[in-house]
Image (cartoon, grey):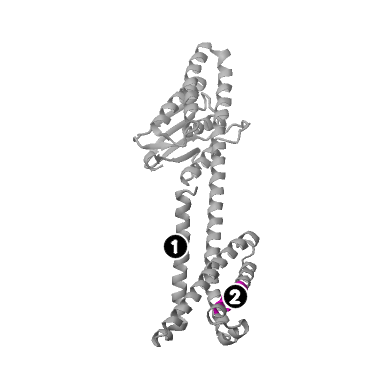
Amino acid sequence: MPSKSDNWTRDLRWKSLLKQFLLGGGAITLTFGWYLLAEGEWVEFLSNFTVNGMLWVLIGVGSGMLVQWLDTKIPWLEAPAKRVVVSLVLMVLYSLVVAMLVLFLYAGLVYGIAPLQALKNVGYTFPLTVVLITLFVGTFLHGRGFFLAWKASFKEAEEHKRAALAAKYEALKNQVNPHFLFNSFNVLSNLVYKDPDLAAEFIQQLSKVYRYVLETQQQELISLEQEMEMLKAYLFLLEIRFGESLKVETAVDVEPTDAVVPLTLQMLAENAVKHNIASKKQPLHLSITRQNGTLTIKNSLQLKGNQQTSLGVGLPNIQERYRYLCGQSLEVETADGAFSVKVPILQLNEQ
């Protein structure tokens, strides 16, 4: 039993065909047979109207089916010139065949005229008119087809691009967890034998930080207030390890809607202590400040002689995640014996 959807689709199809019949028959007949109305030849006018309407429907429907078939054989974007030539030739041939058959049937059934005589009576004007109409319809269909194909390919390319960026972003987020663990356990292994009490306190603070890592791992943005709370716990871990060798200053006013990429501040602080000397004689100075719409993470530049092996995440990771989320980049600067990174402050209500 046909569904309501099938009936609705069928009604639309018939309405479309009727619309094409009336518009095509009226346009062609009024263009080439307007004099019949002036002379009062209503029967002849209606006959021409019927024939022209049938031609318009058959040529339009057939040309549409031909275009759909060619879409699978000669795609627009692969060979546009070849597609235009082949399509127009086939459409003109099809239209001429259909037009001749309609003419012969009409002449034979209504007037009893043989096909050759009917063709002689209409002369070259009838097939020429059919060719012109076909070229007009074909030009419209080809222009529309090429535009739709280009639009579909552009949309598909954008979807692939977004999917690739999303996959890359997921990979970047997944790098944070092992990167954080590797460095934290490295610190813990040094503390266990030196001071068990500090090691126990370190584990408690580490659990807070690691809980934050787990909770934010699937989030694209986190409030700056939460990030600063986690940073306090992380800086405590660093201070346990470095003591007076690390001097930290923070001056950040937080607004409720301020947001950053999760673990941005932790990873930048980690980079500072990983790549620079921190000793009592040469303390490492680290500051986190806010100016307008950016956070500045700045450390004194005193690079180690033998740089530690990098896991290839850290700063590049943050750069890529910011580019993905908001199209912005971090401002990295080395000047006056200091290394600084400016991080854009995003807004939760804008994402």
- Chief secondary structure of the magenta portion: helix
> What residue is pinned by disc 2?
101
Residue 24 at what x, y percent from top left? 47, 73
Report the number of numbered marks.
2
Would you place residue 312 above or below residue 28 in this image? above
Q: Is 34 on the left or on the right of 113, as rendered?
A: left
Q: Which residues are magenta?
A: 93-106
Q: Is residue 306 magenta?
A: no
Where is residue 96 shown, x and y percent of the image? 60, 76
**Label 1 crowd (10 A; few <14 / some 14-19 / many >=20):** few
Q: Does dot 2 land on a helix, a strand or a loop?
A: helix
Q: Amino acid at mark 2?
A: Leu
- Residue occupying image coordinates x 56% and y 21%: 187
Residue, disc 1: 15
Pick the quarter of the image with the C terminus.
Answer: top left
Name the image quarter holding residue 63.
bottom right
Q: Nearer the viewer, mark 2 or mark 1?
A: 2
**Which numbered dot is residue 134?**
none
x, y (%) of residue 30? 43, 80
